[in-house]
Structures are given as structure tokens and as C-alpha cells.
Amino acid sequence: MRVVTTAQPLDVQPSPLALLLLGREADPRSERGVECPGDLPAASDPGLVERARAAKEKLGEKVFVLGHHYQRDEVIEFADVTGDSFKLARDAAARPDAEYIVFCGVHFMAESADILTGDDQQVILPDLAAGCSMADMASAEQVAECWDVLTEAGVAEQVVPVSYMNSSADIKAFTGKHGGTICTSSNAKRALDWAFEQGEKVLFLPDQHLGRNTAVRDLGMSLEDCVVYNPHKPGGGLTAEQLRNAKMILWRGHCSVHGRFSLESVEDVRARIPGVNVLVHPECKNEVVAAADYVGSTEYIIKALEAAPAGSKWAIGTELNLVRRLANRFAAEDKEIVFLDKTVCFCSTMNRIDLPHLVWTLESLVAGKVVNRIEVDKETESFAKLALERMLALP
């Protein structure tokens, strides 16, 4: 005998997080907005390049297109300037006559550009889903709770926050409000030197690897001077004694691309390519940085390869779009440039900005419609700008 039962529908409402993951909602306070209203051109449209060129020509000096180094080649082709996140934000601020700033990068970069540009300028992100997993690892609520933990441990007055450029406007504002500064991968040492002149400890947000590598490699600290605050554990997973003994309180965050490189990757490439130079970004793990020959920011990597002698061999530990572009650029000079890991790995959120999104953005502007504008509220902007200005004032 077979018994058939009929399931009754459950009155269950999906949570905001579930809706966000399903792509049916957007969180304006997160790096992971997902709404992209309007119809995009088909990715296979053979006329996309010409459409982008025509729209950009019609807009003329009204539009200024920024392209981060990790963007696709098809997008970089239409960028007026290329660079890392802070360089591009400064480039935008240096173009006050441009009515529209189209930022081909990720959400936190567009926020920084909005903070640094004039009120009459509009910053646009072609795809709001182009966020940053690292920036998402530290929310304003989590960082406020961390500060409460530091206060309860009796160390908050000794702590100076230093936040990496790869953070949301909310985190930059927190940093400014609590007397801290922003840093880039190029000036992290200067930022930490400044911070330790202001206090005895640093809360480094949100990338633990850049903070640890700078403290150990550049400031001569030991790994024991560093502790990792885990926002998903009570008290960050740390005791009051650990917080009192630490010099560097590192947020448990990382870059999804740079964090995948391993010591095995370094050992493997050295075995496969005798005489190879290993050059990695400081967002990589400490053991990878320690095993590398050279370590530096995206701009440092580019300049190192420009200065490299013909016939030299390089394994690069950074985002694949840039590595592939550099390999093609220097092939004529007989410079062998390979990706450090055997597994192909693009920055998935950077790659959301593609030619269909860029064409849609530019053609919308031609039609008089501003899409995907990024705006930081005035209070957040004020404190975030204070933190950025402290960085700009670093010696």
C-alpha cells in the first residue's frame, strides 16, 4: 500500500541575505549590490566596439573613463587612464570638468572617487555587482563591535585604526572618526610608521596579509606581535591578554585572488623555470611573500617588469588579466612572464565590468540617463575624506 502525502506550502519569507545571494535585492551598505536595471547589449554583438567608440565620442569631454589594471582588455581599450584604485580616484579628482566619471573597477573604488570628486560630478559603476570580497569581509557593524571589544579590554585608547584602500566608505569613515588613516599597498609602511607615532597598537582593516607582511617584513616585528581578530567569533576569538600584548590587531580578511597563491606555487615554478624571478603582491600570504624575490604593489610590479632586462624570466603573483597583459606587452623584449599559480584565476568581481555593461552605461549617458550612480552620504564622506587626507599628508 502506497501512501501519498501532499506537502503544504510553508509561509517562509526569504531573508535579506538570501535575496541578496539570489540577485533579487541590493544592499546599499555592502560591496555586493546586484541591481542593474535596463537591457544590456548581447555579449556576442559584433558591433559592441564600434558602439562604445561612437558613444564615447558623442560624450566627448563630459565623460572620463577610468580602468583598473585588473580589468578585461576589451574594457581597458576605452579607458582614458589606467592604474590602481587610489591613482584612479586621484585622476578623477584632477578632472573637475568631467561631468561623468565612469569607473571600470569595483564598488569601493567608485566610492573613493565620489568622495574625492566635486559635488557636480557623477561617479558611475557600469555593474553594481562589481564588488570586492575583501571589502565585504568587514562591515560597519562588525568593526563597531570590534571597537567595543577593544574598549572592554582596556586597549582602545592605545589603538590607531589603519584601513586599506580596499575597504568600503563606511570603514574609511570609521577610520577617520577614530583618528586613523588609509593606506595603499605602496605606502602601508609609511602609514604604519605614522600610526605607531600616534599610539601603541594598530587595528589593521580589512586585509590581514598586507598588515602582517608590512609589520614583519618592513617594520621588523615578529609574527607573535600580530593577532587576528575574527568577527565571526565572540570577542574576535581573542582574550583581553592577547589584545593587550599585541602590537598589530589584524582583521580576518583577505583578497580572494592573492590569497590563493601558496608556497607550493613558488616552489613549483622555481622547479619548472630555472632562474625565474618570483614577484608577488603584498596581499599574498606571509609564507609566499617570504619565499618571493620581489614584493610590491601593482604599480611596483609594472615598473619592475619595465626595468627588467631582456631575456629575464618572471612568475607574477597577482590578478591574471594584468599578468597576461604584461606578458603580451613584453614578449617582444624576450621577457618570459608567467602566472605564479597553475590554476587560472581572474578577479571574478572585476570581470563583471565587461563591454556590454560599458556600452550600456555610455549609451545611457548619451540618451541623458545616468545609471548606476555611486553616491556616498555626506556624513560618511566627511569622515572618510578626513582619513584619506591624513594619508595624503603622510611624509
Image (spheres, rainbow, N blue to C red):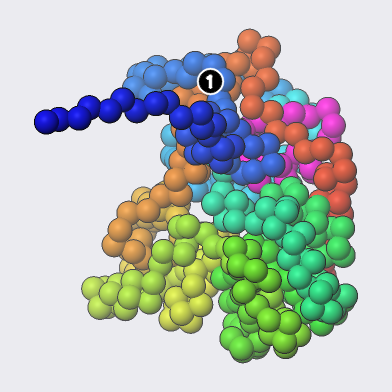
Badge count: 1
Which residues fall within the magenta stretch? 101-126
- Residue 380 in view here: yes
Which residue is drawn at the image coordinates 35% and 19% (left, top)? 46
Of the 4 image quadrants, the one containing the C terminus is bottom right
Reply yes or no: does residue 116 show up in magenta: yes
Up-down relation of residue 143 to residue 109 (above or below): below
Q: Quadrant of residue 103?
A: top right
- Residue 188 in view here: no
Residue in the foreground of this view, choosing between 152 and 101 = 152
Instruction: Check disc 1: other Cα within 10 Å, few if <14, some if 14-19, many if 20+.
Output: many
Q: Position of residue 91 (x, y in %)?
A: 71, 43
Q: Quadrant of residue 341?
A: bottom left
Residue in the foreground of this view, choosing between 357 and 304 = 357
Determine whether the residue tagged by mark 1 lies in a helix, strand or loop. Answer: helix
Tell which residue pokes out farthest to the left in this image. Answer: 1
Residue in the foreground of this view, choosing between 155 and 274 = 155
The residue to which callout 1 is attached is 360
Tell which residue pokes out farthest to the front in this image. Answer: 1
Reply yes or no: does residue 368 show up in magenta: no
Up-down relation of residue 145 to residue 325 (above or below): below
Q: Amino acid at mark 1?
A: Trp
* 388 sits to left or right of 324: right
Which residue is drawn at the image coordinates 73% and 82% (left, top)? 240
* 317 sits to left or right of 220: left
* 37 sits to left or right of 5: right
Residue in the foreground of this view, choosing between 346 and 46 = 346
Of the 4 image quadrants, the one containing the N terminus is top left
Which residue is drawn at the image coordinates 51% and 38% (left, top)? 18
* 279 sits to left or right of 374: left
Q: Position of residue 268 (x, y in %)?
A: 28, 74
Q: Position of residue 10 (x, y in %)?
A: 46, 29
